[in-house]
Image (tube, rainbow, N blue to C red):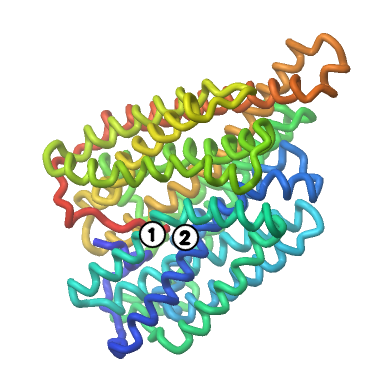
Amino acid sequence: MTGAALAEHDAPLTVGPLFDRRRWVALAAIALAQLMVVLDATIVNIALPHAQADLAIVDAERSWVITAYTLTFGGLLLLGGRIADYWGRKRTFLLGLTGFAAASAVGGFAPNGETLFAARACQGAFGALLAPAALALLSVAFLESRERARAFGVYGAIIGGGAAIGLLVGGVLTQYLDWRWCMWVNVPIALVAGLIGVWALRESRASGANAPTGRWRRYDIGGAVLITLGLAGLVYGFTAAADPAYGWGHIYTLAFIGASLVCIAGFVAVEALIRRPLLPLRVVLARTRGGAYLVSMLAGAGLIGVALFMVLYFQEVLAYSPLTAGLAALPVTAGIFLAYPVATLLLTRWGATPIMAAGAFIGAGGLLLLARIDTTGDFWGTVLPGELVLGLGIGLIFVPLGAVALHGVHPRDAGVASAVVNASQQVGASLGVAALSAVALQAATAYVSRHLTSPALLLTAEFVNQVKVHSYQVALFWAAGFFAVAGLVVLAMVRVGRVRPGELTVPLA
């Protein structure tokens, strides 16, 4: 099951087959759009130190460059799938593409941090329209099994390589042009994809007797607003906790965290009561599937946090150029690719539970290796082994995750069950970046208070680098804890036997 439909619906699809000469061209439009969405999750990581310096963004707020994107993307993904199903996949695809390009252009011209944060949030929101519509269009365009496998192979390769492409493109653009091109590069990509899509894509949507008749009752706007506000409040609370002016015990911090928990509780109540919820609670309350979503969230939290701090370490402490920093981060992706055939083979023999648990603990081990970083920068002896081991662990987790997330699910819930994996990973990334940033900043403050023997030390590069490295080490230890907890969750909740290769699914984003 590919998870093509991102909203729960029982009705058949109303769609005319694409002309043979157009559907492979349509794949090009879908592939370009998906590449844009995937690489934008990593391309700004390399540009972040330069954007922070250019826009005078303080350390406590720089994580919003990443979080604003992942938060709106993950929080609105289910709503985006439902809009695509009922409003029209092609129409939603083109709207998402246009909005994403416009937000990227605004972000490139941002005069301050607040404008950049807002542009990144808009990118995430339009990406939440674009990604599910693209996958649904792909699913209805290729119905013959052999062609479908080829099309999804292209799609899966883009997703697998998108992060690496983002790191390299971000490094090249930042080093040889300007960090703003990491935003502007989306405009020509979207333009080409849009022109192809207008000609090659055919409209499709959900229809039938079971489709809701009310114009707005289809979409569960209230649920989407509640969960997005709840997650945003939680992230903002973590950000306030990292600010020396507030801290964890300040009323300002506690008010945001408390309000966010109320919104999240309200979302759960709404989903339990309304007729067509964004997230049917039966999907997440099943033990195995619920465990898969928790693992996806914890792994997403650890992975994106590590990506942020390692890029900062490469550029701010080791003084790597943006391109060199991008290359230095690639071994994680290499480890993931190495894990794919191993995990696929072992799944047919051992089952998903031991593979995922092993992956989580291996990932934790990789992070502990990375936590040995110091100000001298031993890449080959410290960074490279840690990154490879981390990538191997991540691959062992995520290869079987799609099958586990769909374990025992009713066919009508298969689309939303698959989508929740991706949404939970993005939400985990948002919360992880915020939490790890707060931990790192507090660790830096504590280190300064313990070791600052003279104010003049703050002016020396050596002491400043020691502070930064200590804060990154603490964040890496916490990220390792996320992976270790994920391993325990797998052992306690996930019960899945052997998985056939054909049951592995393509992630959405």
User: Could you tell me residue 469's position as x and y percent?
Assistant: 64, 24
Asked whether the beta carbons under mark 1 and mark 2 sit within 8 Å of each other, the answer is yes
Q: Position of residue 372 (x, y in %)?
A: 52, 21
Of marks 1 and 2, which one's residue comes earlier in the chain? Answer: 2
Q: Would you identify the image quadrant in which residue 463 lies?
A: top right
Q: How far is disc 1 from disc 2 in space, using C-alphas?
A: 10 Å
| Side of 150 relative to 130 (left or right) | left
Q: Quadrant of the N terminus?
A: bottom left
Apparent side of residue 403 relative to residue 420 in the rendered image (left or right): left
Residue at the (38%, 82%) spot, across then down: 25
Residue marked by disc 1: 508
* Tag 2 secondary structure: helix
> Looking at the image, is 484 positioned above or below residue 140?
above
Which residue appears at 29% of the width and 70% of the height?
A: 151
Q: Amino acid at mark 2?
A: Leu
> Which residue corresponds to the image point at 61% horizontal and 36% vertical from the top-left?
314
Q: Position of residue 154 (x, y in %)?
A: 33, 66
Residue at 42% across / 38% down in the picture?
A: 299
Circle 2 sits on which residue?
77
